[in-house]
Image (cartoon, coloured by chain):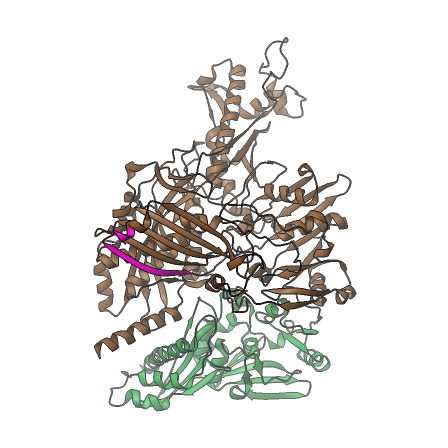
Chain colours: A green, B brown
Amino acid sequence: MKPSPFEYHAPRSLDEALGVLAEEAGAKVLAGGQSLIPLLNMRLAAPAHLVDINRVAELDTIEVSERGVLVGALARHTVVERAADAARVQPLLREAIRHVAHPVIRNRGTVVGSLAHADPAAELPAVLAVLGGEVEAASARGRRTIAAGEFFLGPLESALDPDELAIAAFFPAAPPRTGTAFLETARRHGDYALAGVAALVTLDEDLRVSGARAGYLGVGAVPLVIDLAEPAAAAQAGRPPGTLDWSAAAAFARERVDPESDIHADASYRRHLVGVLTERAMGAATAAAFEGVR
Amino acid sequence: MSTRMFGEPIPRREDPRLLTGQGRYLDDLGRDALAAAFVRSPHAHARIIDIDVAGALDVEGLVAVYTWEDLPGRVGEPLPLLIPHPSLTHGRTAYPLARDVVRHVGEPVVMVVARDRYLAEDAAGMIRVEYEPLPPVVGIENAARADHLVHDDVPGNVGAVLLQETGDVAAAIEHAPHVLEFRLDIERSASTPLEGRGVYARWDADDESLRVYSSTQASTSVRAAIAARLGLPPGKVEVIAPDVGGGFGVKIVHPWPEEVLVPWAARLLGRELKWAEDRREHFVSAAHERGQVQHVKVGFDGAGRVLGLDVRILHDHGAYTPYGVIIPIVTSTQLLGPYKIGAYRAEVTSLYTNTVIVTPYRGAGRPQGVFCMERTMDRIADHLGLDRAEVREANFIGPDEFPYDQGLTFQDGRPLIYDSGDYPELLRKIKELIGWDGFAGVRSAAAAKGRRIGIGLGCYVEGTGVGPYEGGHVEIDSTGRVNVSTGLTSQGQGHQTVFAQIAATELGVPIEDVHVTTGDTRRFGYAVGTFASRAAVMSGNAIALASRKVREKALRIAAEALEADPRDLDITDGVVHVKGDPGSAIPLRTVAVLSNPLRYAFDEEAARATQFAVGGSPEDPPVASGDEPGLEGKDYYSPVRSTFAAGMHAAVVEIDPDTAEIHILRYAVVHDCGRLINPMVVEGQIHGGVAQGIGGALYERMEYDESGQLLNASFMDFLMPYATEIPRVETDHLETLSPLNPLGIKGAGEAGVIPVSAVIASAIEDATAIPIAKMPLSPAELFHLMSARERMSQRILS
């Protein structure tokens, strides 16, 4: 469990980092290293070059505006988790990060690194997807913004080009009268989830549900977003505001996910979990939305 | 200050050092040593056609590459079968490096030595081994079906058939008013200590001696094995177990291939050489345990008393049997627990599979035996509509029935005779601790709120402190320092604390003066090892006996110096004094000086000693016949047979009715290991054991696919529970002394783990009313059991 030989680069500026990425084909970017280092040690990945961006101070940023939260490539999970203004603008971010592994891993791992790693069982890709966020990519060729829907291509596969560095991710703010919830079921506390859901419920001025979306992790090749507006309508039909029945939404979601079996749980159990978690998360998000308007 | 330390919950003395990173583990040693890495088989079963090392030769820093053909004489012979047994008719062991055929993924094929481990792995990656795959045998029942063989010359894949029998079980069951038959399954798990195995060897060419550090549970036996394999006099081989980061059984196996190969190559190369196992290697090339299929047939009366119990067990021992049939013996004997069973028959068929070897892991066959018996008790209670605790009590051996002979032969080859115990009292205590009576009300109140909770119970008896012996050496030097040594090893048990408590109490010295050394053949040459919950019983008693010898000698010398009768003396805080006359006293450090007639005045203590006159007349030799210079003593403890600890666990679990997640709300343990040396250490052992038991009950399994690949060979996918998965463990003790040893103690090391699967299964069954026959149980599996039951009840309704 020692990595294959590689050339180590420790650029001190973004331009320098992008220069190395442009020159060295097959270079991998090292940020928090919580996924990459085990892959290297197990020799499941053997890049010839490693570009360690930990000295690129300009990437260690969190910018919070009313529009949303812009997280720089070196912002550690813990820092984002503890940023009170980020949690105010987009509570889902903090709620999800609390499910990312354990504190020591969150102290080192980065939010943007987790997105770039594109593990469909990870929490943050699902959050970015359900919020319709974006990844900002830079290369020596220039910069571009990649929408979440186009960023995740498959398991551990993102839309980043080999010479590109994900320099930031933008998590849009929650609209007014929106409640969020993040729930997952994992075998052990802090494990990758068997299934998980990031839920958003938005109320209109009459306190009727006007938007309901859920992002799912662990149940497909990429984070899956399901618009639950249709079952939401059924959920509140003939009911007073705040007493919604999300069981139809659960069934709706169950039919639209395509989980796989693995050694920890079979597909049918994961599908069942999607239903249970959907119902619970939508209920919790609805409650949070009402809480917000009170 | 009192110097009576025995029985006190003093904090572990080793912890400040270990918890602040001051420990010296195997890989902390030998910084400049060469490193070994191994090319291991990627196939579960294959013939080796060709090994091409050419690619590795270009790696800069490569020192040597060895295959089986390079191993001379005894180095290349199959590893020893440590514990032969008449039932093991077809025992087979591996070669240190595979010869012709590999029989499990992870079997070592080539050893690479290089300047460091990185380069060794680079070189190992360049070696091409050509294999001809052979059909793999994976899974206990596939092994039993024997469509394919693991060893060509072992028919039916059967290594051993072990029979344990007392009474006429067929007749007993035939005449029983009630009979039940069912099947139980337990999956594989493993010791998985945080520190893997490791060996570091250095050859001293001038002295023609070898020093080996090994992360082992049995340093004296590793020394004997290395000496034998390398053709060295044992006196020229030193083996030291440094700080060892956990063992839990896997490090009792010896010699591991690496323990032969690394010292051999270090000597051949004349260079220091080290191999530190990595986690992936540990999963596929160390050892696993637990996997069994059990077929149970039980006959009983209306009170739930077992009249006849017939158990047929299929046991998976992996690809080789270096450790013999210890696990089958332990399972089939310890299965009986605290009960007197009318007639009993257990037949264990121990089978070869193309998987990692199976050797004892904490509990060592007991968890499986207890699972079998406790599930049986629950089935009987369910069948008769009786309380589960009541059925157990109806079968208990009474407190007045000891010594109780179960009529079988235990793992030490001695009769299975329980020395002491009080099982009804243990049951009373556990019921009180967990709130057994009245739980029905708690359960139905929870059910009214849509919660599913259940309670479970499990009982066990654990044979501990197996022989043949351990020794202790105690020496008081002229600074008053008490050096205690014993040959068995430590892997975190707290020996530095409890052995010091024993010596301090026996000698009357402050515990701060006592320094304990374990597992170092330079200090103590004869030992058996640390396993089978034996360290406290064996070395604890040996150290007590050795301390008594030292005390006696100290009192004799002090009596002479103080012109008193030894019977009038006592030792307090390291000072010998006349009882009732504290002014007439002599410190032990001075006694130590007096004990040695050679008195060069190296220190003040020696000078001070001149005020006392000892040593008899000028006509006598300075060291009397039969006496020795120095204040030291050595003794051994060798028990006639094992001593039997016991305990009972109970748990309350909650099942999420939607997700089938299993939460342990409470876990309680009542334990009887005789006299407690240190209650805090015993509780720590129990807590750790329960944690491993919960791992085995709910999380851990070895996921082999049908081709024999281990799919979860990492801590990401092998679900060892985190602290977050372990509830607070509530404990209570009972102290039923063992009449077999001077200190009255019994072992405690494995107690925590033994009944956990049985207890959790019992509680889940109670919460869900679904029969649980298979452990571990995942939420996904429980969900499917619950869904199947729901479908069934809907069918009945419609």
Question: Where's residue B338, x and y in %?
Answer: 33, 45
How many numbered discs?
Answer: 0
Q: Nearer the viewer, residue A201 or B797?
A: B797
Left/right placement of residue A71 relative to residue A277 reads right
Residue B170 appears in the figure: yes
Q: Is residue B714 above or below residue B412?
A: below
Q: Nearer the viewer, residue A18 or A26?
A: A26
Magenta highlight on residue B175: yes
Magenta highlight on residue B488: no
Question: Where's residue A259, x and y in %?
Answer: 45, 80
Q: Nearer the viewer, residue A181 or B507?
A: B507
* Segment colored magenta: B173-196
Question: Where's residue B561, x and y in %?
Answer: 54, 16
Question: Where's residue A49, x and y in %?
Answer: 70, 74
Q: Is residue A219 above or below residue B734?
A: below
Residue B28 appears in the figure: no
- Quarter that holds the C terminus of chain B: bottom left
Q: Residue at x 27, y 56 (%)?
A: B179
Left/right placement of residue A42 relative to residue B383 reads right
Q: Is residue B798 above or below residue B226?
A: below
Picture quarter containing residue B410? top left
- Quarter that holds the N terminus of chain B: top left
